[in-house]
Amino acid sequence: SLFLSRNAIEYIAPGTFIDLDEIRELFLDNNHLYTVSAGTLAGLKKLDMIRFDNNRISSIAVGVFEGAAAAQTVSISNNNLVTIVAGIFRGLSSVRRISIDHNALSFIEPGGFYGMPMLNSIDLSYNERLTSIDKDMFNLTELTSQFVMFNLEGCKLDCQCDIDWLNEAPFTTSNAYCATPPELSTIELPSLKC
């Protein structure tokens, strides 16, 4: 394990970890990171867990996770991410759990969660600006898990009928409530019938 927590780190140059190929856990939480550049995790072939929690991250470049194919847990909680762009998680073919809770997410591009066939837990809780969850952010044909827990607690979901796909297998929503339209406010998403 490499513990770099609580060091006021503001930037990590691409290739910094290139010769540390035996590292299994990387703790970069509680620093002052604003962005994570492509190539930052290059060389970390055996990395199982990555923690970027409690930073100030507002952008993560496409390509950051390439070279970290063995990672099973990625946590980017308590940051300032606004958008998940398509391809951002490219390279995470073994990831099972991803936490992006307590950010400022308002949009997830189609393809935002492509390339993660083993995924079985997504925590997007307390992204209060996130009102819509589009089916196209996943490649449903690549998911191998028969059960994907999707935590949407604290999100202000607009419960139009196009969101009811979350009630279909393999997804199980947790703490997901409608915020709008007014007649559906406080209805739990699994109860939504279109």
Image (cartoon, helix red, strand yellow):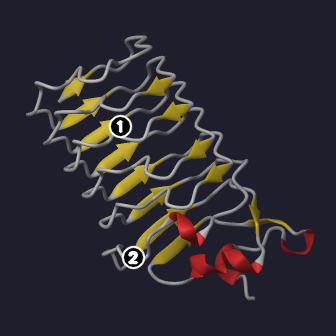
Q: Determine crowd level at label 2: few under 14, some 14-19, many 20+ residues with C-alpha closer than 10 A.
A: some
Image x and y of residue 117, in percent: 32, 67
Image x and y of residue 171, in percent: 49, 75
Question: Label 2 amino acid?
Answer: Phe
Residue 83 lies left or right of residue 179; in this view the side is left
Q: Quadrant of residue 104?
A: top right
Give the residue drawn at x 54%, y 47%: 84
Residue 175 lies left or right of residue 137; in this view the side is right
Front residue of 139/5: it is 139
**Disc 1 versus disc 2: nearer the observer:** 1
Give the residue drawn at x 66%, y 80%: 164
Give the residue drawn at x 52%, y 28%: 57
Q: Is residue 124 above or below residue 192?
A: above
Q: Is residue 145 above or below residue 62?
A: below
Q: Mark 1 sits on what residue?
A: 64
| Mark linked to residue 180 | none
Q: Is residue 152 above or below residue 190?
A: above
Q: Earlier in the sequence, mark 1 or mark 2?
A: 1
Q: Mark 2 sits on what residue?
A: 147
Front residue of 50/69: it is 69
Residue 106 lies left or right of residue 145; in this view the side is right
**How far apart, in angstroms, are the residues tagged by discs 1 and 2?**
27 Å
Total numbered circles: 2
Image x and y of residue 127, in percent: 65, 47
Question: Label 1 amino acid?
Answer: Val
Q: Determine crowd level at label 1: few under 14, some 14-19, many 20+ residues with C-alpha closer than 10 A.
A: many
Element carrying mark 2:
loop
Looking at the image, the residue that sits furthest to the top is 8
Image x and y of residue 105, in percent: 64, 45
